[in-house]
Amino acid sequence: MSEYQEVLSREMRFEAGRKVYSRTYDEVGLTTGSTHACPMSGCSGLRVAVKWPDGRHTFPCSRGMALRQIIGKESAFIEWRLL
């Protein structure tokens, strides 16, 4: 396992500055780095703080987000999309 794959497997997936695309890809928000456990009964996801271009803050559950990770030899990045 490369060091980049190891990094992506930890909680750095939600660090500040990760892109989050809206369901229709017409807006791109950024994660703030803040997370907390999802309060829904039986859910094992994390609520991820996202700041949108208009200044709104939302807290989507990670279980309702799709992860896209690109891993290369020299770099890696992560993006999210709301489902």
Image (tube, rainbow, N blue to C red):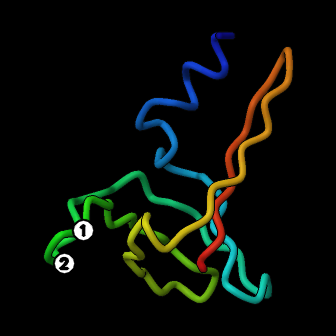
Q: How crowded is mark 2: few (under 14 residues within 10 Å), some or many (20 or more)?
A: few
* Residue type indicated by callout 2: Met
Quarter of image, res 72: top right
Point out residue 58 in the picture as x, y percentages from the top left corner: 41, 81
Q: Spot the residue most to the front.
A: 42
How many residues crowd around disc 1 within 10 Å: few (fewer than 14), some, or many (20 or more)?
few
Q: Residue at x 66, y 60 (%)?
A: 19
Residues under numbered marks 2 and 1 in contact, where contact means CB atoms less than 8 Å apart? yes
Residue 81 appears left or right of 64: right
Residue 3, percent across and down?
63, 11
Q: Is residue 80 left or right of residue 42?
A: right
Quarter holding the N terminus?
top right
Residue farthest to the right, as pictured: 73
Q: Which label sits on residue 24?
A: none
- Counting the numbered discs, the total is 2
Distance in Å between CA atoms under marks 2 and 1: 6 Å
Left or right: 58 with respect to 43?
A: right
Residue drawn 45% across the image and 58% down it:
32
Residue 47's image quarter? bottom left
Q: Position of residue 81 (x, y in %)?
A: 65, 70
Residue located at (79% from left, 39% from top): 70
Identify the secondary structure beneath mark 2: loop
Name the spot of residue 46 as percent of width and height, x first.
32, 60
Q: Label 1 belongs to which residue?
A: 43
Q: What element carries label 1?
A: loop
Which residue position is annotated with label 2? Answer: 40
Name the image quarter holding the C terminus. Answer: bottom right
- Give the residue drawn at x 85%, y 15%: 73
Q: Is residue 18 left or right of residue 16?
A: right
Tag 1: amino acid: Cys
- Say above or below: 36 vs 33: below
Vertical relation: 80 (above or below) 39: above
